Amino acid sequence: MKLAFSTISCPDYTIDEVAAAAARHDFDGVELYALDGAVLSPELLVERRAELTSALGSLPVVCINSFATLHSADDVARAAAEAAIRSTMESAAALGCSKVKAFGGEIPHQPSPTVFDAIAASIERVAEHGRSLGVGLVVETHDGFSKGATLRELLDRVGRAGMDALWDVHHPYRMGESAEETDRLIGDRVVHVHVKDAVRDGEGWDYRPLGDGELPVREVIRALARRGYDGYLSIDWEKMWHPELAGPEVVLPQYRAKLAEYVAE
C-alpha cells in the first residue's frame, strides 16, 4: 500500500508547499482538494493546470475531487454535476491522475430502485468520457451512501468500467457498520481509501491523532491487505472545514508514521 495526503489537510498551503511537505515527510502521492485557502473547483483546476503540473513534477496526483453530487432529480442540476465531473476528468488526465471523486449525495430514507437507477445512468454517461481519457470515477462512502450496504446498491448497477468505491473509514463506522461488514460489502471494488481518526463527542466527532481515536483504521488496512490491495491510503484530516484542528506540520508526520506502522503489520 502507498501513502498520500489530501490537501483538505493543509488547505492554506500553496502548491509549492504541498510538494515540499510530500518530499519532507516521504509521501508517495498527493490528493487534490484545496489550495491557498480555497477548494480546487473544476474551474480553478482548469486555470491552474500548468502551474500544478510544473510544481508537482514527478509527485503523483492520486485522486481529485470534482465536488459533484449525483442525487438530484432535477435535470439541470444533474447535467451540471456531470459537466463538473467531465471537466475534472480532463484536468486529471492532464495531471496524470487516474481517479476522480464524486458524491452520490443525499438520498431518501427508503429510496426506490429508480433513485439508484437514475444515479447509475448519470455515472455511466460520465464514465464513458473518463474511459476515453484513462480516468476512472470513484464514489465515496459519504452522505446518503455512507454505509457500504447502500453504496453496494449502486456498485451492483454500474460495472467496474463505470465506477469503483472510495472507502472513507469514518462514515460507514459512524453509521454502525464494522470494518468487516464494509469490507464484505464493497471491499472488492475499493480502489482508494480516506484515513482519519476520531472519537464520539456527543452528537459530533472529535478528530484525533491516528491511534488515539476509535475509528477502525487498523482493521480496514488488515481487511484490504487480505484482498491484496495495493492502492493509496490518503490522509483526510478535515482542516479545511475545522480550522481549529491541529495543523499539517503536526498531523502529516504523525499520521504518516502510524500508517507505515499499520501497513508493516
Image (cartoon, rainbow, N blue to C red):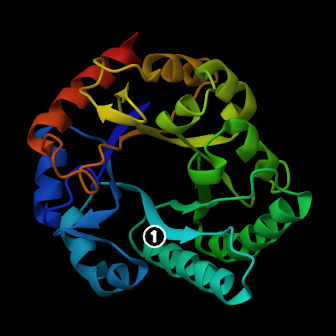
Q: Give the quarter of the figure containing the C terminus.
A: top left
Q: Residue at x 59, y 22 (%)?
A: 179
Q: x, y (%) of residue 46?
A: 37, 84
Q: Is residue 176 above or below residue 261?
A: below
Instruction: Kindly give the residue lying farthest to the top in the view shown.
Output: 265
The image quarter containing residue 228 is top right
Q: Residue at x 35, y 78 (%)?
A: 45
Q: Residue at x 32, y 48 (%)?
A: 29
Name the one closer to the observer, 155 or 89: 155
Badge 1 amino acid: Ala
Instruction: Kindly give the residue lying farthest to the right in the view shown.
Output: 113
Q: x, y (%) of residue 98?
A: 51, 60
Query: Which residue has dot 1 on it?
Result: 92
Name the one closer to the observer, 77 or 229: 77
Q: Is residue 16 above or below residue 168?
A: below
Q: x, y (%) of residue 255?
A: 25, 29
Q: Give the quarter of the figure containing the N terminus.
A: top left
User: As drawn, is 182 to the left or to the right of 40?
Assistant: right
